Image (tube, rainbow, N blue to C red):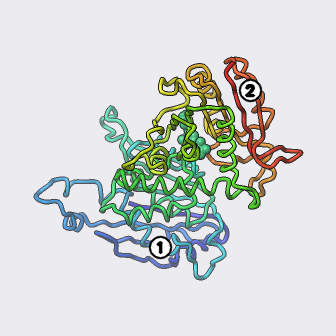
Amino acid sequence: MLFTIKTERYPATDLGYLLHKHPAKIQSVAITAGTAHIYYPEANEHACKAALLLDIDPVALVRRNDANGFSLDQYVNDRPYVCASFMSAAIAQAYSSAMNGRCKDKPEIVDEPLPFEAMLTALPVKGGETLLRRLFEPLGYEMTIASAPLNPAFPEWGISRYFNVALRNTITLKKLLRQLYILLPVCDNDKHYFVGEHELEKLMEKGEGWLEQHPEKELIVRRYLKHIGPLANQALERMMKEDMEEEEAEAAPKELKRLHDLRLETVRDILRSLNVRTVIDLGCGEGKLLKLLKQEPVFTKLTGMDVNQVSLQIATRKLKLDSYNPDTRIHLFQGSLLYADQRTKEYDAGVMVEVIEHLEENRLWDMEKAVFQFARPGYVIITTVNAEYNVKYEKLTAGTFRHTDHRFEWTRSQFEAWGNRVAELYKYTVTYQPVGELDEAVGASSQLAIFKRN
Ligand code: SAH
């Protein structure tokens, strides 16, 4: 199997410097159970293409297999001929300097996104073309995918699970190699070696800066770590934590109190002032609000619901619900705001802190019915970012959202128009207030609505 990288960025032979491999030489590197050959089918100033060809020795493969007894599978399998974890390991070995962002002779181009085309032959994909697109397109790749029938004589057998794929992107070489390093075994959903703690660290390191925000993060992590639940959960927890901490803390001016804490404290104070006793936190995430409310004995029943199982696991730990002496006032469950759920009924207040902007705008209608019509708590408190305020964040360019998972961000008048309609339709009375330091022109960073059941 073959993996090529090509660039036409002038002078294209810079690729040789970036890969630390001279275009005029054929080089060979010993890898597990075989050899990787690196050569350049094309190398001039206008176009330069480096090829990595794997020559896996099937006999050596069998010899290093620890399986006991005779298994035909050891002898008859696709491993020597596909672009999967052997290729991934070969990339890490043959192109290690490039993958680590080192370039002795031209360090200035390491961080420069260049137009690349990568070609992979015989890539085994469990999940087919749909999965391939779900993995690569969110990272900005333009793809050409070629597949063939399993056997041309028997078209009814369907298509083969091996694909030839061309990936085009303007990206740093370091990132391209890191993404392929992780995604090749993910496509295949298998690995030729033992997966342990060490593999988790590699995933965290090579995934840094792109995997945390990938919409298929969970699938990637689980497949990469060979579906070893505790390892995968650990990775996801770590990524989520880093992601959340980066979120607004980065965008917000230092002198502001952390906006998120302010929102949570504001909600707590409102709940106190409304003499609420039982609260359901809808989209509770890691349980930050519940942690704050737990300190107040006035709350007799506190429930958190979230669609994300990993968040709930973090919440369970942070709220110490799995310890010997759990707080029996607190319960968590997995559920979605888009469906009416019996378990959300009979609370004095329902809260959604920074949740609505994570829902698809065209599904808000389902949430409205589930919350305002079905659950129908005495009060509903909702916070969301104020899009007008984004101009104050230096790091946000116009038209971008504060968080990559936000589906929309509303101005004050958009939020109020939505709130007024919902209140009228479901017979609530609504009031609004800003959260955060007030700016005369653009309002505060966050906005909050209190709905009171009529
Ligand atoms: N309220 C928390 C988390 C905000 S992040 C806090 O203030 O810290 C948004 C949360 O909404 C995430 O935890 C996400 O999993 C959850 N979420 C997104 N869509 C959801 C849905 N349809 N139903 C329930 N929760 C959802």
**Image quarter of residue 78:** bottom left
Tag 2 secondary structure: strand
Residue at image location 62% in from the left, 36% down from the top? 352
Q: Residue furthest bottom?
A: 105
Left or right: where does residue 448 sit relative to residue 322? right
Q: Mark 1: which amino acid? A: Ser
Decide if residue 221 is in sight here.
yes
| Disc assigned to residue 54 | none
Counting residues from the start of the chain, the first of labels 1 and 2 encountered is: 1
Q: Residue furthest right?
A: 440
Query: Which of label 1 and label 2 is nearer to you?
Result: 2
Label 1 beta carbon less than 8 Å to ligand 1: no
Where in the figure is residue 37, as x and y percent of width and height? 40, 71
Q: Residue furthest left?
A: 69
Total labels: the figure holds 2
Residue 33 versus residue 147 in the image, above or below:
below
Callouts 1 and 2 close, C-beta under 8 Å: no
Q: Residue under label 1, please give it.
A: 96
Depth order, front residue of 25/74 = 74
Residue at image location 79% in from the left, 36% down from the top? 412
Q: Residue under label 2, please give it.
A: 430
Residue 280 versus residue 285 in the image, above or below:
above
Ligand 1 is found in the corner quadrant, namely top right
**Image quarter of residue 267:** top right
Left or right: where does residue 131 sit relative to residue 348? left
